[in-house]
Image (cartoon, helix red, strand yellow):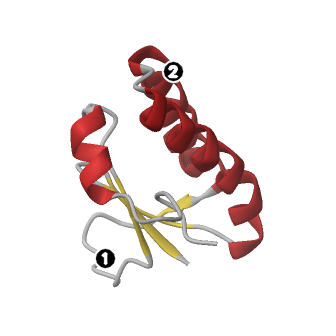
Amino acid sequence: MIVRIMGEGQVRLAESHLADLDKLDDELLEEMESGDGPGFRRTLHALLQEVRTLGTPLPDDALEPSDLILPSPEATLEEVRDLLSDEGLIPG
């Protein structure tokens, strides 16, 4: 699957990694619901770092349709809240 991190680019990520990412996504959702700004920031950075670590970056000139779009590391709690579905950032 192709994952876009807003402002950074795209990575190819095996779907087998989604279960691990979903745990971080659940934490992020809980922190957003409770208004835990520092926890939200820490978990968002951990989620993005995990995607960067597990994924393979696509060349800058590659324009693949993204299966998943994640916010930039600088995104605010409110901006991420606008991106969320009922399942969080990562469906499943």
Q: Which amino acid does label 1 sit on?
A: Ala
Residue 79: image quadrant is: top left
> As rendered, which of 22 and 2 lies closer to the eye?
22
Residue 17 horizontal/vertical position (percent): 73, 62
Lower sequence index among marks 2 and 1:
2
Element under disc 2: helix
In the image, 76: left or right of 42?
Answer: left
Q: Using the image, determine if residue 16 lies above or below residue 19.
A: below
Crowding at mark 1 (Cα within 10 Å: few <14, some 14-19, many 20+): few
| Screen quadrant of the N terminus | bottom right
Residue 15: image quadrant is: bottom right
Q: What residue type is labelled 2?
A: Gly
In the image, 85: left or right of 12?
Answer: left
Residue 69: image quadrant is: bottom left
Q: Using the image, determine if residue 23 lies above or below residue 86.
A: above
User: Residue at position x 44%, y 15% from top?
Assistant: 38
In the image, 61: left or right of 42?
Answer: left
Residue 40 horizontal/vertical position (percent): 46, 28
User: Residue at position x 51%, y 31% from top?
Assistant: 31
User: Residue at position x 77%, y 70% from top?
Assistant: 16
Residue 19 horizontal/vertical position (percent): 75, 61
Q: Using the image, determine if residue 63 lies above or below residue 75.
A: below
Tag shown at residue 9: none
Residue 77 horizontal/vertical position (percent): 30, 34
Crowding at mark 2 (Cα within 10 Å: few <14, some 14-19, many 20+): some
Judged by depth in the image, the label closer to the viewer, 2 or 1, is 2
Q: How far apart are marks 2 and 1 (CA)?
A: 34 Å
Residue designated by label 2: 39
- Count of numbered circles in the view: 2
**In the current view of this chain or complex, which residue is farthest to the front?**
34
Tag shown at residue 62: 1
